[in-house]
Amino acid sequence: MENFKFELDAVDGRSRAGRFMTPHGELRTPVFAPVGTQATVKALTPEQVESTGAKLLLANTYHLYLRPGPEVIAKLGGLHEFMGWQGPILTDSGGYQVFSLSGRREVDEKGVTFQSHLDGSEQRFTPESVIAVQEQLGADIIMAFDECPEPYDRAYNEVAMGRTHAWALRCLAAKQRDDQALFGILQGGIFPDLRAQSAEFIAGLDFPGNAIGGLSVGETKAEMNEMLEVIDPILPEDRPRYLMGVGSPDDIVEAVMRGVDLFDCVLPTRLARNHAALTRQGRMNLRKALYTEDERPLDPDCKCYACSHFTRAYLRHLCVANEMLAGSLLSIHNIHMLIDLTHDLRLAIESGSAAAFAEDFRRDYQKHRPEGI
Amino acid sequence: MENFKFELDAVDGRSRAGRFMTPHGELRTPVFAPVGTQATVKALTPEQVESTGAKLLLANTYHLYLRPGPEVIAKLGGLHEFMGWQGPILTDSGGYQVFSLSGRREVDEKGVTFQSHLDGSEQRFTPESVIAVQEQLGADIIMAFDECPEPYDRAYNEVAMGRTHAWALRCLAAKQRDDQALFGILQGGIFPDLRAQSAEFIAGLDFPGNAIGGLSVGETKAEMNEMLEVIDPILPEDRPRYLMGVGSPDDIVEAVMRGVDLFDCVLPTRLARNHAALTRQGRMNLRKALYTEDERPLDPDCKCYACSHFTRAYLRHLCVANEMLAGSLLSIHNIHMLIDLTHDLRLAIESGSAAAFAEDFRRDYQKHRPEGI
């Protein structure tokens, strides 16, 4: 497991600056992974993704299993080769998508039978099959199969947690490749006792990394933060912690302050395609008429390709004219913004000023940039 | 007019290799201009367009007049600054779009009243207003206002040609900036005598370049070639000739063999968004199942970014999954293919082998690449 050594360079309060080794390079944490659901970060070439500073990409097992199929990707040399990304890649287990995207589904102790959202065909995932698919895809970091329930339904969360724990054991047993780091996933909804129980169980299995599932799925930000505080003292310090599906700039800051190292989210690219830009002072809607003749870059403090080459007026024109380039440029900006935020968080942790950084961030972010600024 | 000097480096039969100086750089002809209708080549950043080898872009006056408006672009420093393209730009006059895109329209001797295709509002173009708009946009090459009729209607073509000639004079009189080359446009449908008459009239007005309008609008390839042969001996040899809205690889080769220097067309980018690729052996439909596991580049002889980085299998996956990246990568390939073709045409002209080049090209292109190749 030399490949997956995790070293902490600095700790400040609960926040951590680490390095995680993967077969495709080192990740400096905190790290944010943009999402390439179908083996492409939407609207961007790998070169453009690289220009944002992103080091780690997430791809979705559920989507790639259905199309083009893991055997196709394996035959073409695996995901890195297939999509032309030479840095580290993480695949999820498909668990979340089976519950959020598919049509009818039936869960039993052995696995989940579900309907493809593409053609309605019946499909089945088990812990073993999901590991096999992820081994065919060939990402650096792969995930255990889990069941992600409604956060507020206690009875369901108890059952789903139990199943997730049993499946974690079976995923460990099924795993064959030693050049992939399998992360366990803990669940437990918004129930502190369940979260603690799940963290203890998953931490006890000696995964090289631990993931926090079932958050950012409808609960409040305060509830998410409370769950992170419950989990933090239980998870081993010498393993990376991954908060799945998060997030927004403020969620990332709050989670880093509570000991999280790794993030992924569709937010920056999805917002981009809806013509919204992330900044440290809040979001901007680039379609607004007040930008019609605005000669400033989207964010004057940003060094991304979009901000170094184009005015708000041009971006606004592309948005209003529904040009694809709007989605590409805003995706570059939004990913860069989150990567840049994690870089600054790391610097703050290294210099022992994480709390002050978070305080400043909260003040600016909650202020919300007046649209005209 | 030092800016717009045109020099012939070589002539081979009727085909020409020239250099046209513009305020934003020299164009080596034959030259193909990709189209950036709304001040963006669809789905590509200016960097990506540059990577195709493209030197000249076309933008559409009709679209930019309606949105964002020429005054906005002028205020932001003109088209080059607005869209981040530092090379030469050509704007058309909007004449063709008024006749092909707008709703109701009424033509009179003074100009055209038309309905915006965006909001139905009533708008009016005159030769004078169209020159004023193009002076606000600030392209290097601008076009006279013309009327583009059905190619087969002789009576209409006579009237439209007369109007186009009168408007050409008024455009010349209206023009104020001396850092833009105004090209005249000849019309005449598929009628050799009208084409000859129009070529003589327009050539007599001493434009720094002459454009051929009203072709590639429904007539046969044989008729287009015949019209080019009628015009060729009439147009001055020391001025560039621009065949508007063309074209396909075969049309470009045939037109170069008949004395044309300059081309523009939406074809490469439109085909790309429909998942078709141009090659010298014909078109490929990248959605076909036979590419599912094809590890070869789209075109093994191509040096574009798409062909140097990705397999047919990956491109096919992007197309079938309707990912935006498919349109971007195929646009890069298709534009590069046409630019590369004009480069090879130039080399052939310089070495006196244009006829042989065209013969070889026709044989390969008509063969049509078996899809499995």
Image: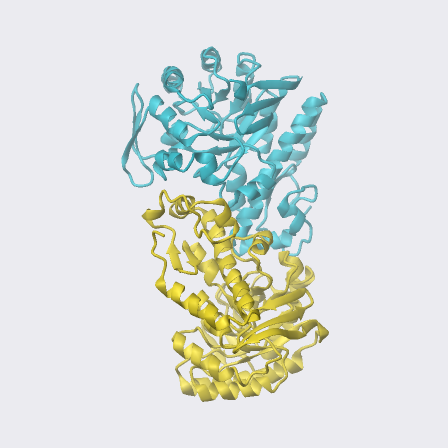
Chain colours: A cyan, B yellow
- Pick the residue in front: B222 or A265: B222
Classify residue B333 as left or right of residue B6: left
Residue B91 drawn at (x, y percent): 59, 68
Residue A320 visible (yes or no) = yes
Classify residue A183 as left or right of residue B85: left
Number of residue marks: 0
Q: Is residue B243 above or below residue B296?
A: below
Write down the quadrant of residue A355 in the picture.
top right
- Pick the residue in front: B361 or B225: B361
Residue A222 drawn at (x, y percent): 55, 23
Residue B136 drawn at (x, y percent): 66, 68
- Pick the residue in front: A136 or B325: A136
The residue at 52%/56% (across/down) is B42
Classify residue A305 as left or right of residue A320: right
The residue at 65%/50% (across/down) is A309
Residue B34 visible (yes or no) = no
Q: Is residue A76 above or below residue A185?
A: below
- Pick the residue in front: A269 or B350: B350
Residue A38 drawn at (x, y percent): 43, 39
Write down the quadrant of residue B16 in the picture.
bottom right
